[in-house]
Structures are given as structure tokens and as C-alpha cells.
Amino acid sequence: MKILLLADIHGNLPALQAVLDTPAAAACAEAWCLGDIVGYGPFPNECAELVARKMSRVILGNHDVKVLSAKKVSRHKEAYKTFIFAWTRRVLSPATVKYLTSLPGESRLKLAGHRVVLLHGSPVGMDDGLSIHTPDERLAALAVKARADVILVGHTHDAFVRRAGENYFINPGSVGRPFDGDGGASFAVLEIGARGVRATRHRVAYDNAGVVAEMKRQDFPDILVRAFAASRSPADTLPEGVRGDLMEEAQKFGARARYEKPHALHVARLALELFDGLLPLHGYAPGGRERALLQVGALLHDVGLVRGEDGHHKSSRDMILEDRLLPLSDRERVVAALVARYHRKALPKDEHKHFAFLPDHHKVMVERLGAFARLADALDRSHRGMVRGLETRIGKNAVTVVLRATGPVDAELECGRIKSDLFERAYGKKLDLVKG
């Protein structure tokens, strides 16, 4: 049996219609929707009416709930969210309100011997998001909680098909608000039968310009118009420096994890000194986003210790990936998490799944920034802050880093020479460490 699987339509009628008009959709016996029918797009009533008419199984999403309770929701710190919840609630027809109110928060069924559950977020709740970067261990735990063989989710706008033992986690991506810059409406076709479970992901182009034009006509905030036009999240369309106080949130993150603050701050400072002193080598802008991502990754490199010493570098990665309070885009979050992860042990390679998912230029970024964090951690090997500053010199075949120290730094020099491996690979130059 073939099933059309949709999620996160968000009031985008042209995208929804484009999906329903595809041959892949026409070949399906049923159509299921995983929530967030309304919110953000300018056609909430039209989308709800079409979903009610065409979909055989539908559940609520978190934005559907927020729109229905918009009068009770306090003002958001992001003004555009206050606007969109109020605007959508104001234009909803009585029929749409009645339809949305009738929808369940989840749906369960058994199909060809497989237990299937439709959720918006995860088995934890509709606001809990899963992605291609969710650790395998967490998926395994959630599979037990889900009490299902096939777990269908939306919410993150992140299309994936993943396995956790014998269980499937499937997210069809977002119909109406893709965040990856692709521009096409995302959906999936799920096949369940005696031979097992199979899901294929699809994208289809639609009249995005028409959606943007309607948003402008309705005087939507510029940040939302830009986000729809670029097929990005609103945070990704903000100018640098307007995404919230990243370092304040990073330090709060570290405090929650009970990190060793003096060591963390010292490592972050040394990593930034390397970044600033070697601008001609790496080519990133002096005050660019790359510098901020290095600072976050270096500051949070040891937060995983709260989960135990063994493999704490991987725990640091997972904790950063799971966090939703740091004002980072999804791609930035992965880069910062991997900068933290590669401060010790193995170097980046394509066998590492989180690294493998990145585009090539982001892999290069992880290696270049990760090299600074890895070296900076080594230069505070004793956790006593003995290295007070760095002087860098770029030569034809080598880079020299002079350590200005307040005491003996033999341990730092020895560890730094061992952990210069990523630097030498990333920059193709020998690294010489000397005490000044």
C-alpha cells in the first residue's frame, strides 16, 4: 500500500497543490498529514479545506495549536511570531477553526502487521524535534516509548528516513516552509506491505513568487517574506549580529552542564587568538560567523563530561545538536557541535555520520575551525591557564606559534605537538610550537 506523507504545510496553498498534483501523489491509495497545516503562510483556510477534502488521516501540529490559542499566547520576543499567530487566528473561518479543533494530537493504526504512529514532533511531545543528527541512542529510546514499528514525524522540516533497530523514523520534510534553500515542496511516499516498509523522499517546484507576493499584499513582516523567498528559516535571513546574544546563551548552556568555566573560557580565548592571528591562512572574515562558531565550539568542548568521561567529546557534540536555545541555524549548530567533538580523539572523516552529511565547504570549515579548538585545548593541558597569549608567524611551509607563558608549559607543548595533527591536515603546513 502506498501512502502520501505530508507535514508542515504552514498555509502555503501553491506548495500543497503542487504536491497533490504530482504523479507520485496520484499513485497513492491514501494521504496522511502530520500537522502544522496553518501558520506562517497566507492561505490558512484554503489549506485546511484542501487537507480536509484530500487527506484520510490528519493530526495537529504545534503551530496549529498555537494559532487556535493565539488569544491566550503571550507576546513572543520575536515580533513576527506575535504577528503571525494573531493574523492567522483573525482570518481563520469558523469552518477551519471547527476542523482544526476536531483533530487529534496523534494517530495509531496497524497496517500489514506493522504498528504505525503519526506524530508531529516525537513520542515525547509535538514540540520535540527529531532530525538526521539525532543520536542513534536517543532514537532507540524513543522507539520504545513510541510503542510502534513505524514512527512518522514532522516539525523540524528536516526530511529523513532512519532506522533504530527494527523501527523506522520517517520525516517527509516540509511542504510549505523548506529551510534548506532548495525551494521545492518536500514530501514522501510511504509503502507498507507484507514485504516490509519503504519510504522515498520527493521534491516538487511550486509558485513561490506568488506566495511571497500575497504575503507582501497582506503586509507580513519583512523577515517572514525574506524567509519564504529564500526557503530558509527566519533566523537564517537575519543580518549578522541580530540573532540574539550567542555567547550569553552559550555560557548559560555551559553552566547548565556544570562545565569547568575557567578552562572553557581560556580554551575559547586561545582558539580565537589562533583564528585572529592566522587570518591570511584561513581566509575567513575577522568578525564573521565562522569566528563565532569557533568560539561556541571551543567554549562548549567539554560539556559532555556531565554525561561521563568516556566519549565525552561525542557527548558534547550530541548535547549541542540537541539544544534548541542557542541562536544558531541548523547548519551552524552542526558545525559548532563538530568543532567541539574534534577537540580530541579521531580526526574528521566521512565515516562519521554528522560530518558526512555536510556539504564540502562546511567540511572544510569544520576542519579549519576544529584545528584551532583542538590545539587550544592542548595548550591548556594542565587547566591552569599557564599560556597567557600567543604569537603567530606564517611561513612558506610552516606556521610557528610562540607561547607567552607565566610558568612551565612542558605538558602544553607536548600535548600541542600531538594535537597539531588536524591543523597540519587542514592547512597543509607544519606547525611549530615554541615557548617565548
Image: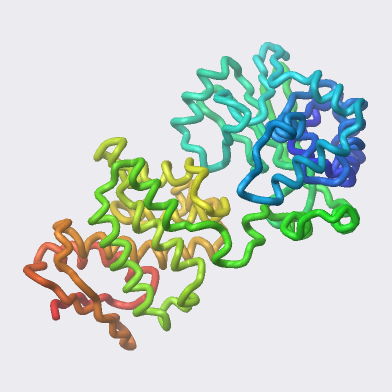
Q: Is residue 429 above or below residue 25?
A: below
Name the residue at 75% across, 54% down. Answer: 224
Residue 293 in percent (x, y) is at: 45, 61
Name the residue at 81% across, 36% down. Answer: 89
Q: Nearer the viewer, residue 57 or 187?
A: 57
Q: Which residue lies furthest to the bottom in this view?
A: 396
Snapshot colouring: rainbow
On the rendered image, what quadrant is the N terminus found in? Answer: top right
Q: In this view, does 427 lie above or below 384?
A: below
Residue 268 in percent (x, y) is at: 32, 62
Name the residue at 86% across, 22% down. Answer: 98
Q: Which of 353 and 371 is in front in this view?
A: 371
Quick check: 289 left or right of 220?
left
On the rendered image, what quadrant is the C terminus found in? Answer: bottom left
Whether residue 45 is visible: yes
- Quarter residue 71 falls in: top right
Name the residue at 87% across, 51% down. Answer: 206
- Quarter residue 373 falls in: bottom left
Q: In this view, does 245 lie above or below 257?
A: below
Whether residue 35 is visible: no
Quick check: 384 left or right of 364?
left
